[in-house]
């Protein structure tokens, strides 16, 4: 595996400040939720909810709500949606000074249809603006990236950005979210620079070309990713929990909570990765990390948005205490 520095107390460049830099997508999310089972080719009664979203931006918000100093690098347009994203992100505590405005493009919009159980059935992502976030546009952020205690990427980024980040910052600790089956393969060439990879089962299949349904299949997928240089692999599987694999441990974990209301499962993976990042900064062991990250994910499920203002360090600890009491 790659020789990544695993010390959360490392301060690259001599900085004494602990902070995370997240680079990735930021969207206005429009979620339509059906009141009952979805009927295709028909109008379905339900509710429509508009909020700030995007994998990278959601991870940054979740980290900020957990009390982490978090800087976000993304692209927005000079439009109403862009101004809304900036306002909501600032309110959530994200440092947005490195967000780049692209006057010639419109801010990303994500449109999803959610069934009555809270699962996304289909979505359309209008995210052409992120293609402007090239290596050339990221170079002015080089200093802050070198000073970062942790860098988190999502695979919305174009290849030139991923290549530059992997080549320039491969010795730093990089966490990656694979976003979708379409975009997961983008990171394949740069896995040797990835410390922690968070992916879903179907995204893992798209990335590796292997099936990822059974435990033996998941083990084979993890083996391929480790051979490519990834230190830690986390494969989310919805209600079946999370498969995890490191050099020393491998298995599946769930966090069961009674009477849980699921309104939107779309942001659970983003909160899970934020929980992994928080735990790495705190130098927690794998079991504690998994329980914390799953509790963070659990808190987002009852919110119609893909990030939840209910998320906080105290709220995560309360979920864990309730589970331990059962």
Image (cartoon, rainbow, N blue to C red):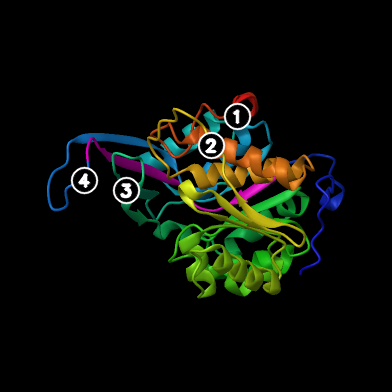
- Name the residue tied to disc 4: 38
Q: Which mark is residue 323?
A: 1
Give the mark toward the camera: 3 or 1: 1
Give 83 or 10, whichever is nearer the viewer.
10
Q: Secondary structure at mark 3?
A: strand
Spot occupied by residue 237 in the image (x, y as percentages of width and height)? 50, 53
Whether the magenta-drawn stretch holds residue 274 is answered as no
Query: Residue at left 57%, top 39%?
Result: 255
Give the quarter of the figure containing the C terminus: top right
Whether the magenta-drawn stretch holds residue 26 is answered as yes
Vertical side of 116 occupied by 259: above or below: above
Q: Which mark is residue 256?
A: 2
Q: Main secondary structure of the magenta part?
A: strand
Q: Are marks 2 and 1 in contact (CB under 8 Å)?
A: yes
- Say whether disc 4 or disc 1 marks the residue closer to the N-terminus: 4
Q: Quadrant of residue 284?
A: top right
Horizontal placement of 283 versus 132: left or right? Answer: right
Query: Residue at left 32%, top 48%?
Result: 111
Q: Are marks 3 and 1 in contact (CB under 8 Å)?
A: no
Residue range in magenta is 20-36
How far apart marks 2 and 1 lie (CA) works out to 7 Å
């Amino acid at each position: 595996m790659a020789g990544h520095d695993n010390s959360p107390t490392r301060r690259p460049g001599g900085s004494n400040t602990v902070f995370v830099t997240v680079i990735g997508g930021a969207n206005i999310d429009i979620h339509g939720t059906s009141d009952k089972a979805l009927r295709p080719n028909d109008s379905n009664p339900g509710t429509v909810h508009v909020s700030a979203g995007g994998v990278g931006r959601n991870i940054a918000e979740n980290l900020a709500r957990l009390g982490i100093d978090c800087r976000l690098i993304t692209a927005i347009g000079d439009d109403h949606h862009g101004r809304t994203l900036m306002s909501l992100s600032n309110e959530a505590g994200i440092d947005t000074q490195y967000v780049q405005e692209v006057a010639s493009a419109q801010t990303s919009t994500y449109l999803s249809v959610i069934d009555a159980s809270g699962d996304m059935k289909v979505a359309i992502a209008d995210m052409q603006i992120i293609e402007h976030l090239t290596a050339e546009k990221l170079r002015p952020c080089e200093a802050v990236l070198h000073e970062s205690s942790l860098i988190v990427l999502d695979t919305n980024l174009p290849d030139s950005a991923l290549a530059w980040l992997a080549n320039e910052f491969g010795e730093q600790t990089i966490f990656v979210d694979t976003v979708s089956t379409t975009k997961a393969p983008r990171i394949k060439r740069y896995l040797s620079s990835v410390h922690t990879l968070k992916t879903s089962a179907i995204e893992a299949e798209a990335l590796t070309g292997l099936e990822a349904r059974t435990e033996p299949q998941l083990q084979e997928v993890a083996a391929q990713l480790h051979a490519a240089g990834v230190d830690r692999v986390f494969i989310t599987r919805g209600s079946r929990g999370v498969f995890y694999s490191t050099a020393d441990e491998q298995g599946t974990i769930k966090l069961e909570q009674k009477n849980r209301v699921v309104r939107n499962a779309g942001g659970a993976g983003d909160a899970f990765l934020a929980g992994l990042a928080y735990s790495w900064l705190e130098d927690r062991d794998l079991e504690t990390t998994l329980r914390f990250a799953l509790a963070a994910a659990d808190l987002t499920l009852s919110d119609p948005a893909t990030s939840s203002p209910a998320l906080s360090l105290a709220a995560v600890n309360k979920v864990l205490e309730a589970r331990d009491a059962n």
